[in-house]
Image: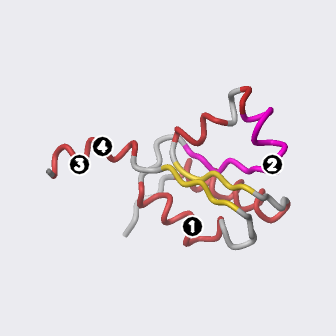
Amino acid sequence: MLFVDLCICFQHKRLVSDAQEKEPEVVFIGDSLIAYLSYIEMWDTHFEPMHALNFGIGGERVENVLWRVLNGEMDQMNPKVFILIISSMDRKVLLYTV
């Protein structure tokens, strides 16, 4: 069973709501590298005009993003482009399993 903590569940509900209310052309989904984009000027100047949504959550791992996708975050959208960046938090796991 996948572990999804309470904070991620709260953010997941907010993102599902955003997906239902907006019609994005570009969707960014992933970990903190994606989440951080919405806090820099480049987001406002380059991505907002493209009707982009940021579905990044800091600390996300591959299994968390997969859980979010399988539990409704993408159900209401039909964007032209998905940009996915995950696994930067999984490096520690890989170091121990290699």
Return the disc, 1 or 2, that comes first in the chain's sequence.
2
Return the disc, 4 or 1, that comes first in the chain's sequence.
1
Residue nearer the viewer, 2 or 27? 27
Secondary structure at badge 2 equals: helix
Residue 55 picture location, percent across and down: 64, 51
Q: Which mark is residue 50?
A: 2
User: In the rendered image, which residue does mark 3 sit on?
Assistant: 94
Q: What's the residue type where badge 1 is placed?
A: Val
Secondary structure at badge 3 equals: helix
Return the disc, 3 or 1, that comes first in the chain's sequence.
1
CB contact under 8 Å: marks 2 and 3: no
Q: What's the residue type where badge 3 is placed?
A: Leu
Secondary structure at badge 1 equals: helix
Q: Residues within 10 Å of mark 2 (few under 14, many from 20)?
A: some
Q: What's the residue type where badge 4 is placed?
A: Arg
User: In the rendered image, which residue does mark 1 sit on?
Assistant: 69
Q: CA distance from mark 4 to mark 2?
A: 32 Å
Judged left or right of residue 87, residue 97 is left
